[in-house]
Amino acid sequence: LAQAVRSRSRSLRSCCETIVKRRPNSGHSVQHRRMVFHILDISLAQEWLNTCGEYMKCIMKPFAKMKFGAMWRCNNDSLEDWFQTWSVVQFWWAVIINIAAAVLLAVLSDVDGAVGVAIQGLVVGIISAYLWAHLGWFAVMKKKGCCCCCFICLTDAPILFLLFGVWLLIWAALVVLNSVTHIGDFDLGFIYTILYASYAIPLAYMGLILVKIWQKHQNEAQLGNTSAVVVGKAGS
């Protein structure tokens, strides 16, 4: 009798586990995700820094995941690879246009100190492009959604893909609008404008891809099934 009770108990427990793992009236498994709210989390910053070497390898081989011709087409089957490719291309795009813009400004502008301004803009432009590229890659590829403001970060929530994507699309529009203001800077100011306006292309692609990644995760809890708060260094 005791053996029969134990057997029936195991069967009931197995049945309950199966129900918990599946949505009611659905044949799809539930994706459990835990959103994390980070405050002054040094370990998160260290985790990002530890990926510098990995991301540098991506920069050195921009088309390792996707060929140049394929990255211009919609790739719904490999959205993460598509994003990584455009993330790296965004960096190299910024390097090229910042170098070209610096040369134009230094050679053609008659403003005093144009060379110094050109060099400063070149350095700041390249550094900021790397930071945005690496942070975006880390947010998507490593944290499955990440949004930071000063010393506060949210990670592991699908809705963050959408927020980041919308922000990139807005940024792309602002880049175009801002570039128009440089048309009258000097005789060939229109070239300067075209260079900076073109930077909206990788930004728009990255934004579009992130929206598509969010759509892929729409069946998941957008703010996670559970949440956690990390203050300071995790585990300390």
Image: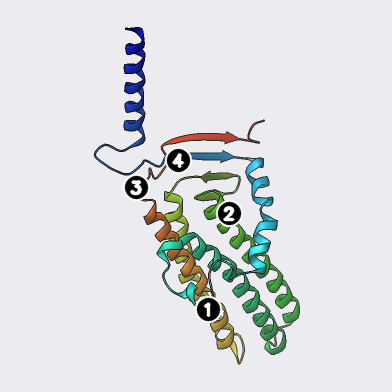
- Label number found at residue 198: 1
**Around disc 3, counting alpha carbons within 10 Å, would you say few (fewer than 14), some (14 to 19), or many (20 or more)?**
few
Q: Earlier in the sequence, mark 4 or mark 1?
A: 4
Position of residue 23 measured from the top left corner of the image (x, y, whole percent): 30, 38
| Disc 1 from disc 3: Cα separation | 35 Å
Position of residue 134 measured from the top left corner of the image (x, y, whole percent): 61, 59
Q: Amino acid at mark 3?
A: Asn
- Label number found at residue 219: 3
Which residue is rendered at x = 66% and y = 82% of the image? Answer: 100
Height in image: 105 above or below 56? below
Outermost bottom residue: 187
| Disc 4 from disc 3: Cα separation | 12 Å
- Seen from the viewer's position, the closer of residues 124 and 71 is 71
Q: Amino acid at mark 1?
A: Ser
Q: Earlier in the sequence, mark 1 or mark 3?
A: 1
Q: Secondary structure at mark 1?
A: helix
| Disc 4 from disc 2: Cα separation | 17 Å
Quadrant (top left/top right/bottom left/bottom right) for the C terminus: top right
119 displayed left or right of 210: right
Height in image: 129 above or below 6? below
- Label number found at residue 138: 2
Which residue is rendered at x = 29% and y = 43% of the image? Answer: 27
Question: Which residue is label 4 attached to?
Answer: 33
- Seen from the viewer's position, the closer of residues 10 and 127 is 10
Q: Secondary structure at mark 3?
A: loop
Q: Quadrant of residue 186?
A: bottom right
- Seen from the viewer's position, the closer of residues 122 and 106 is 122
Q: Earlier in the sequence, mark 4 or mark 3?
A: 4
Height in image: 150 above or below 17? below
154 displayed left or right of 47: left
| Disc 2 from disc 1: Cα separation | 24 Å
